[in-house]
Amino acid sequence: MFDIDSYHKADTVDEAIALLSQNPDAVPIAGGTDVLVRLHSHNPDYRHLVDIHDVAELKNITMEPDGTIVIGSGVNFTDLAQSPIVSVNIPVLVEGASSIGGPQVRNVATIGGNISNGAPSADAAPPLLVLNAHIELKGPEGFRRLPLHQFYQGPGLVDRNSGEIMTCLRISSTDYKGWSGHYCKYAMRGAMDIATIGCAAACKIDGDRVAGIRLAFGVAGPTPLRCWRTEEKAQGSVADQTLLDLVSGSVLGDLRPRNSWRASKDFREQIITTLSERVLKEALKRNGVSIS
Amino acid sequence: MNRNISCTVNSKSMTWQIDIRMSLADLLRQHGFTSVKEGCGVGECGACAVLIDDVAVDSCLYLAVWADGRNIRTTEGESKEGKLSPVQQAYLDTGSVQCGFCTPGLIMASTSFVEQHKGQKVSREQIRKGLAGNLCRCTGYDGIVRAVEQCIDAEKK
C-alpha cells in the first residue's frame, strides 16, 4: 500500500485548483508514474494528493484557427505520438515522446507531469524548448502563460505556485511552419532508460543560409537548457560544415553538465559536442540541406 | 480512506470496497488474480502488466481507484473454455516460458501488441520496441519475439 495521508479526486480543473488551494502540502497526481514511484520509496513530500487522472478537459490536442497547437497537460505520451496534429506538424516532439520509458509507462505518463516535475532529463523538454513552447497555468487568480524556459527554475523546481495546475502547452505556428527538427536521446540502453544526454535541434532555411536555429539539451545542466549564445552566433550563417563546426565548438559555453553516477562530466561534454553536430545535421537534412 | 468501485475483470462485473492507498496490482492479487506479479514496483519490469480498456498498463503504478468503470484483462481470462489464447499457445509452441515470473505480464503486453498490429507487417525491431517495457531475467527474449511473430503471421493468413 502507498503511504498516502490524504486523497481527493478532482473531476474538473477548477475543482483541482480549489482542492490544491485548501491544502498547500498537496501535489497533483496525473499518470502516477513519478508520484507513485516516489511514494513507493516513502517520500514524505507526496503524501497529500489531488488526483487529476480523470480530468477530461486536460486530455485534448487541438489546433486553433491561427495554427497554434494546444496540447493538454493530461495527454499521455502514446496519444501524443499518435496524434495527427502532432505527428504531421511537430514530429520532433514525437521523437521525444516515443523515447520515454517503455510502452506501459507511455500509455499513462503525461506530458504535463514530465515537465512539471522539473527533471533535467525529461525527454519531452528539449523538443518543446526548440519549439518555443509556452506553458499555460490556471490558479485561483486565473490563467497565466510563460515560455517553457522560464518555467524551469532549478533541478526539480518549476514556477508553479501552490494552487496552480498546468492546463496546456502552446506552440505557435510561427515556431513550426518552415522549421524542421530532430531529437536524439543518448542513453546506455535502447529502452527503459534515463537519458545520459538529450539533444534537440530545429532550423529554418532561407536560400543557403539558416534563417533560424535552435538547440536545446537535457541532462546538460540543472534544468533542460536552450543554447542561446550558440544560436545567436550561428544565426544567418551559410548552412555548411563551417556552421556545424561553429555550433559544436560553442555549445559547451551554454551548458553546465556535471558528474553523476550515471556519467562523468567529461563523457557528457564529449556526447554534447558530438550530438550538437549530428542532430543539427539531421535537422538541416529534413529541411532539404545535406552536408556530406 | 475506503471507497467503492465497479469494474469488470476478465468480462465479469465486480464491485469492491477498496482502500484508496492500494495499487491495482494489490487489489487484483487480493482477489485471487495472482498471475499479476509485482517485480520492481516502479514501472521498469512489466511483470504486473494488465490491459485496462485494452491498453497495457503496469498495475503496480496504477491506483486501484482508477479502475472504477473500466474493463480489466489479466492472463487468467485469456484462455477460454480450456483453450489457450493464440498468444499463450505461441509462447508454449516457441518454448518462451522459462522461470515463468515475467510470463503473465509479457503475455498481456504481447496480446496488446498483436491486437494493435492486426494484419500489419511488423519487424523484429518493432516487436522488441513493443515489448520494451517487460524484463525477462532468464533473458529468453528470442523465443518471446518468435512467439509474437507467430501470432502476427497467423493473423495474416
Image (spheres, coloured by chain):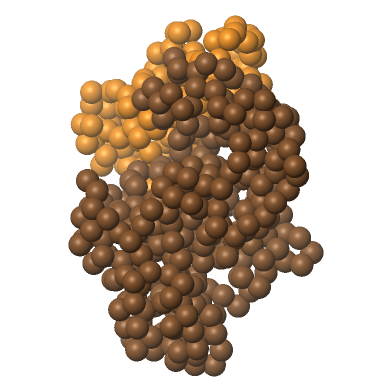
Q: Compared to A252, does A42 lie above or below?
A: above
Instruction: Tell me if I can see residue A105 in this picture.
Output: yes
**Identity of the residue drawn at 73% across and 48% down:** A143
Q: Color used for chain A?
A: brown
Give residue B55's position: percent from left, percent from top. 54, 34
Give residue A153's position: percent from left, percent from top. 48, 51
Q: Relative to B128, is B9 on the left or the right?
A: right
Q: Compared to B100, does A247 lie above or below?
A: below
Give residue B76's position: percent from left, percent from top. 45, 17
> Image quadrant of residue A270?
bottom left
**Identity of the residue drawn at 70% across and 40% down:** A139
Front residue of A80/A127: it is A127
Instruction: Tell me if I can see residue B86 in this picture.
Output: no
> Image quadrant of residue A211?
bottom right
Front residue of A274/A160: it is A160
Q: Relative to B53, is A92 on the left or the right?
A: left
Q: Relative to B117, is A155 on the left or the right?
A: left
Q: Color used for chain B?
A: orange
Quarter placement of the N terminus of chain B: top right
Front residue of A183/A263: it is A263
Q: How many marks?
A: 0
Q: Tell which residue pokes out farthest to the right in this image.
A: A65
Q: Compared to B119, does A107 lie above or below?
A: above
Give residue A93's position: percent from left, percent from top. 52, 59
**Identity of the residue drawn at 66% across and 47% down:** A137
